[in-house]
Amino acid sequence: GPSTAQTARAILQQPLIAMSKTLGILALQGAFEEHEASFRHLPEELLKSITITQVRTVQELDKCDALVIPGGESTTIKIIAGTDNFMDILRAYVHGGKGSDGVERPPRPAWGTCAGCILLSDNVTNGAGGGGGLVGKFGQESATKRCKYGQQVGGLAISTCRNFFGRQIESFEAPVTSEDPSSVADPAGRKAFSEFPAVFIRAPAILEVGAGVRVLARMKHPSTNEDAAVAAASDRVLVTCFHPELVQDYRIHQYFVEHFVLKSTSNGQN
């Protein structure tokens, strides 16, 4: 049989397994496979502390300690998810509180890319194709400009403009900068986003940020040269207007795991 030392080692190792976090990737549509592949490129030590799983149902969602909402079409995600209380439960998952099923949930970390960024924004406006000069201060947008596809999931106090870069610029790549004054207390975030080769596909941009939100990346509009914020975070919610999962640079995926997933106090198994 096993020696005392082996038994002791086995017992000592158990809490580590219990502390492992389950990271879900919403797999209703969009680049969920690319996200999963990017996470699997992270250092082996880090991968030992997480289990990556694809999420398509409320039952799968509730097993997760953190969630990634990939790009795609935010309207489509809402339509697919709207069929079975999924959006309502997702809202409870991100904000904490009771879903339509009456189950009390703790708030959990989430990262939204592109369409996912739109879903996690507290306010969304429909861009007139290139330029975000349409909007006043955060929270004061006119109702006509607000998103017409039902309620957001929300979770991050930002105002996001759909198709900010204009439909005519379908996609482009541009490096982002990460020196915004609001992120000075987050050196890890600045390092993860510094000169990141960002891929924008019919992308939104962040027009305003509210209290408790730091801007992690900015860039210049390729045609108007207008400055735009394109990534932001609070303590629990991260959003990127671009697609980090489409390039061979895994810094932002690592940042999300280290500073959101593993710092989460919730346990999805409960």
Image: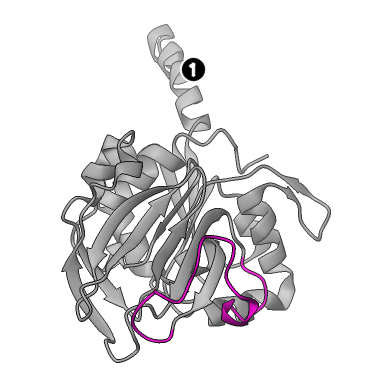
Q: Residue at x 41, y 15 (%)?
A: 9
In the rendered image, residue 194, in percent from the top left (x then y), is placed at: 19, 50
**Which residue is depicted at the point 45% across and 73% down?**
161
Q: Tell me where residue 205 appears, x and y as whole percent.
A: 38, 69
Q: Between 40 and 203, which is closer to the camera in this rendering?
A: 203
Was residue 139 drawn as part of the magenta stretch in this picture?
A: yes
Q: Is residue 27 visible?
A: yes
Residue of label 1:
11
Q: Is residue 222 left or right of residue 50?
A: left
Quarter of the picture containing the C terminus is top right
Residue 204 is a magenta residue? no
- Mark 1, Cα crowd under 10 Å, few <14 / some 14-19 / many 20+, is few
Picture quarter with the N terminus: top left
User: Is 95 situated above or below 265?
Assistant: below
- Rendered location of residue 216, percent (x, y): 32, 50
- The type of residue carrying mark 1 is Ile
**How many numbered discs?**
1
* Residue 47 seen from this side: no
Q: Which residues are magenta?
A: 128-152
State the residue at coordinates (71%, 64%).
88
Q: Main secondary structure of the magenta part?
A: loop
Q: Residue at x 38, y 46 (%)?
A: 256
Above-or-below relation of 157 to 230: above
Q: Residue 23 at x, y = what percent?
A: 47, 50
In the image shown, does 29 or 133 lie closer to the viewer?
133
Residue toward you, 266 or 52: 266
Residue 245's quadrant in the figure?
bottom left
- Residue 119 lies left or right of residue 221; in this view the side is right
Q: Secondary structure at mark 1?
A: helix
